[in-house]
Amino acid sequence: MQTLTAPKSLGATLRHRKRYAEQPKLFQQLPTRISGKPRVESYAGNHPANADGLDARRTFPGQNISRRAFAFSGAVFVPVKAARAIGFTKQLKKAEISEEDYAVSQPFLFRAKSHDGVKYFDTQPGSGGKLELGNIAVVHFTCKYRGLTALSTREARTLGGNRTVAEPMEFTYGVVPSEFSKPLVRKTVVGIGAEVRLDPELQELYIVSTVFDGPADRAGLQVNDVIVSIDGLRNLAELPISRIGTLLTGDTGSTVEIEVKKLNGPMRGTFERMILTRQATTVVAKKRTVNVETGGGLFAGTSGPKPPPIVYIPEALAGMRTGGRRVIIVPADVGYEDTGEGEIPPGAEFKLEVELLETRNA
């Protein structure tokens, strides 16, 4: 037989009842099964929360909800008024920016030519001072290619122990570097658009680099692929490099047949014959790299990432305020052009995220 324990005192009983009476009425009006009566589908009809749109039938459409099922469902109903009272008014951030959300900046001059405006979207409007021409702008920028971070001032310097430290970029807003005010000049060579070199040990002629969108690049030739023959001529390792250069270059529109041993990708180890049409291709200046020997100090490697030219274009950042964040779709010609940078290949479009940290008078 079950033994019931009475309250120790009348005062304790009264305090217990008082605490119970002070509890919210929401769960005291849950649907119950009463003998001989159908299960109640919703408790919202007679509850003040119904004014806020709380209804179990809308939450669980087509189901009869008992108190036990409701308790074990793990659902928590919070009336809209109550939610607003405790601060649940913030809207969820958009997971992805649609094409229609982007605005277009004003056209601008770049490399002495008129350029169409670029697409941008403010993910966070700033609340501080507005960026004005002549101000010193302090920004963080992140370049993303295919959704992955390729360059960022938030990881600008490499520390000892494979750590990184942020290093914001600082520049005068409205002042475009002189190199971007002049036309882009490139030396051109008529050929297959590939740089080759002889390996004296392996006695092989291999590809060192290809020009973006040149004949070799379009044919799928990659770095380290070995050229076995040119127009049927084999034993290329026995020829002087000047003679090989003459074989690969020629008149615009002329063709050359080469046989290649693939050393990359799924076709590794196979031989492929192809006919390439010579054309004028640009010779891109080699990037200058700086090796820093720190001897175990704080900083290691090179300085901060190279900013894309679009950062300096006033129209691209027009209207930004301190604390604001903007996403810009950067075309290749105002990005890293035909050289590429880091994981961003030559001629590639990418997204640039800019956060304006500070503005001040020069």
Image (tube, rainbow, N blue to C red):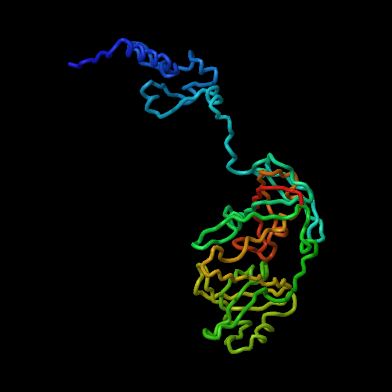
Vertical comparison of 184 with 3: above or below: below
In the displayed structure, 208 sits above or below 316; it is below
The part of the image, by quadrant, that contains residue 13 is: top left
Q: x, y percentage for residue 331?
A: 70, 56
Q: Quadrant of residue 91?
A: top right
Total marks shown come to: 0
Most foreground residue, 149 or 15: 15
Which residue occupies 63% across, 69% down? Answer: 217
Q: Position of residue 177 (x, y in %)?
A: 76, 60
Q: Is residue 81 above or below residue 153?
A: above
Closest to the observer, 162 or 325: 162
- Point out residue 75 in the picture as x, y percentages from the top left corner: 43, 28
Q: Quadrant of residue 294?
A: bottom right
Residue nearer the viewer, 93 or 155: 155
With 268 as the anchor, is 21 left or right in this view?
A: left
Q: Residue at x 25, y 13 (%)?
A: 6
Q: Quadrant of the N terminus?
A: top left
Q: Which one is in front, 49 or 294?
A: 294
Question: Is 79 drawn above or below residue 175 in the view shown?
Answer: above
x, y percentage for residue 12?
A: 32, 14
- In-image side of 350 versus 297 (left or right): right
